[in-house]
Each structure stands twice: as C-alpha cells, then as structure tokens.
Image (spheres, rainbow, N blue to C red):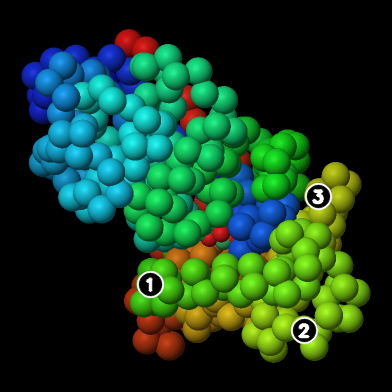
C-alpha cells in the first residue's frame, strides 16, 4: 500500500498516521431480512477500500479519493452534521459524525469495490474510515459498536435506511467462511464455505442495471415489514412463524402479507443453508438459493428483468443455484457453479443479455476474505 501513503503525502504535504482497509460483500442467502432482525449469511469479498488518515490541528476535515484524482473536499468539523455539503464524501462525514469525532482530519480513500454493483462499496468506505479512526483516536469501540455507528452514518447522514448486514460483514468477515449474523444482537458464527474444495465457484454477475426505484423501493419494503409486525403484534418479522402469519392474514394488507411471507421464509432458508453447509451439501444450498430468488422476485418484488435473465441463463447453463443479491432493482446476481462450468455460464449470460439488448454484464468471483483492519504507521 505504498501508493496510497505516497499519494497521501503528495496531496496533504505530510505523512498519514494510520492506514486501514475494509471489504465489500456478497450475501449467500438472507436478503432483505437484516432490518427485520433476521439471520443473514454474507461473506466479505477480496475487493476492498483503503483509507489513510492523519489528524490536523485547524479543525478542518479534508477528504480526497484516488478515484477522483485527489480532488480535495473541505469542511469545518463543526459543520459536520446531517444535511451538510458533500456527495460521496457524506459516507465519510457520516462516520465522523456518528463516532462523535471532533478532531480535524486529512483522509484519502482508495476503493476497489465496484460501485453500483450491489457489492456494498458504501459499507467498505464507511468501515475503512471507522476502523482507521478507531485505531488512530483510540476510541476503543468494539466491532459491534462500529457496525452500529456506520449503519447510523448511512441511515441518518446519507439518508439510506439500510439494515446492518453490510457494515457487520465488512467489519467481522473471516477468510474462508461465511458469517452467520444474528441481526438482532449482532452475534456471529463462522460457517466454513469451502467452494473450491467442492469443485465449485461462486460467480458474481454484475448486471450493470440500476433502476430508479432503488431508494424509495427499499424504504417501502422496510416500512411494509414494520407495519405488518405492528399489526400482528410482534416486534419484528423474526418473531413471526408462518402459522402466525397465515392466521393473522386478515389483519394485514395483501402487500404486507407477501412482504412478510418473504421475510419469514427467508429466515428459515438461511438456517437451512447453514445446516446444508455443515455437511457440504451444495445441492441443497443451490435449491435454497433458487427459492430465495423466487421469493425476492415474486413476494418481495425487488428483482428486475436483467437480474431474472442472469439467474435463468445461469440455471440453464447448469448452475446449482442462482439469485439476485443485495437491495435489488439492479446490481448483481450470484450463481453457484461447478468450476468447470464457469466459462459456459458466463457465455450463456452474455448471450442472453445481448439477445435482450441489455448492457454487457461484468463477472467476478471471490473467495470469502478477511474483514476490516487498521494499522498505525
Ligand atoms: C442493502 C442494505 C442491507 C440489506 C440488503 C438487502 O444492501 O444495505 O442492509 O438490507 O440491501 O438484504
């Protein structure tokens, strides 16, 4: 990482005091249930955002990024509050605000998580800054505290009502394993995900589609789950069984019913996936992944044509399972494929996209990688 440190000196005229990094994520299964206090099973990917930070004594926050060719954004720390100036810089400012930092800072970030692909480049950015500040300013926050602080930054500063999955896995991910995260209390369990040993690969297909619904659609889904829970007299979807949902059907609207149906069934699919992985039963995992996609497409209605085409083309090419990941309305799908079938799957997806006149998709693979870290220089 000499280049980020050298760049930092070039831009700010002095050395960085801490260097930190945090990864993006993919979610194996457990979609749109983090804000319903459910269980999710994501893993941290190899792509990450690096941050280099140093204190300054004049009460100013200066932020630059390698991707924006070092253009410097400047604000007084006393002006760092929701509604402040800033574009992508708000993800950084939000973390400074939610951690209650009052020091002036120089911050340079360098991100390699593809933006807009549904791989949580925003959580990687927030968490790289959070672990860096935690180390530099000796804040002594636990990873759970940092997950809550970075989620608060995104909810209250950026204005995106996300759950806590992305930040948690970016902070707590472990190499070689998926993270079973209980979104109610943030307790975790490492679930070995040895795809390579099983002769498989998890292909990530970035559809390059971004539909306008993203923000409003997400908030609307979250609100439906909350209103359904309130009408059914439970704290969250986590406390609901399928039987309770069926018997309470006339207390909620049809939309609330199908949203809740997704949430309740998805929570069970996550727990079933953990059981399947404990015996390396990838066939069953594939079926659960497929069922998750159907539920997201038909009950939660957060898929889109590009995602459905990517999923169907992967399945036609022999994938064990395929589904959309992340918030939806575009972004990426995953496909669990035999290693020997990766090329065949990619060309099937490319063909299907070309036939439909969609933008050319991008492909990635990633093994489960380590979570965030920081080091004083
Ligand atoms: C986005 C949000 C997460 C989660 C997913 C859907 O990535 O940031 O909190 O809700 O969507 O599972």
Of labels 3 and 1, earlier in sequence is 1
Q: CA distance from mark 2 to mark 1?
A: 35 Å
Of labels 2 and 1, earlier in sequence is 1
* Residue shown at 64% from the left, 68% from the top: 226
Q: Is residue 341 left or right of residue 2?
A: right
* Residue shown at 36% from the left, 77% from the top: 212
Residue bearing the label numbered 2: 251
Q: Is residue 101 visible?
A: yes
Dot 3: within a 10 Å radius of its alpha carbon, few (fewer than 14), some, or many (20 or more) residues? many
Pointers 2 and 3 in contact (C-beta within 8 Å)? no
Label 3 residue SS? helix
Label 2 residue SS? helix
Q: Position of residue 229 (x, y in %)?
A: 72, 69
Residue bearing the label numbered 3: 274
Of labels 2 and 3, earlier in sequence is 2
**Rendered image quadrant of residue 249:** bottom right
Residue bearing the label numbered 1: 210
């Amino acid at each position: 990482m000499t280049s980020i440190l050298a760049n930092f000196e070039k831009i700010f005229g002095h050395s960085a005091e801490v260097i930190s990094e945090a990864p993006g994520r993919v979610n194996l299964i457990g979609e749109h249930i983090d804000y319903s206090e459910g269980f999710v099973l994501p893993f941290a990917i190899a792509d990450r955002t690096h941050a280099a930070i140093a204190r300054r004594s004049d009460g100013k926050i200066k932020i630059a990024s390698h991707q924006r060719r070092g253009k410097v954004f400047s604000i007084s720390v006393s002006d760092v509050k929701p509604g402040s100036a800033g574009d992508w810089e708000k993800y950084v400012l939000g973390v400074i605000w939610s951690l209650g930092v009052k020091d002036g800072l120089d911050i340079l970030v360098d991100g390699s998580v593809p933006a807009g692909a549904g791989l949580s480049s925003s959580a990687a950015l927030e968490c790289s800054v959070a672990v860096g500040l935690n180390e530099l300013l000796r804040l002594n926050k636990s990873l759970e505290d940092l997950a809550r602080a970075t989620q608060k930054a995104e909810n209250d500063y950026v204005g995106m009502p996300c759950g806590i999955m992305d930040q948690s896995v970016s902070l707590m991910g472990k190499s070689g394993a998926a993270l079973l995260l209980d979104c109610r209390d943030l307790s975790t369990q490492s679930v070995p995900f040895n795809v390579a040993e099983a002769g498989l690969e998890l292909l990530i297909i970035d559809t390059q589609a971004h539909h306008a619904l993203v923000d409003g659609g997400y908030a609307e889904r979250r609100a439906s789950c909350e209103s359904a829970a309130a009408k059914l007299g439970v704290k969250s979807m986590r406390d609901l069984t399928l039987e309770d949902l069926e018997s309470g059907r006339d207390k909620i609207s049809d939309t609330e019913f199908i949203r809740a149906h997704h949430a309740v069934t998805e929570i069970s699919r996550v727990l079933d996936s953990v059981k399947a992985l404990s015996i390396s039963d990838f066939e069953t995992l594939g079926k659960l992944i497929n069922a998750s996609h159907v539920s997201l497409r038909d009950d939660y209605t957060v898929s889109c044509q590009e995602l459905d085409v990517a999923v169907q083309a992967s399945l036609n090419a022999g994938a064990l399972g395929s589904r959309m990941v992340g918030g939806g309305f575009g972004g990426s799908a995953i496909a669990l494929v035999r290693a020997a079938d990766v090329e065949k799957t990619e060309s099937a997806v490319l063909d299907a996209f070309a036939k439909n006149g969609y933008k050319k998709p991008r492909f990635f693979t990633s093994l489960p990688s380590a979570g965030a870290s920081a080091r004083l220089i």
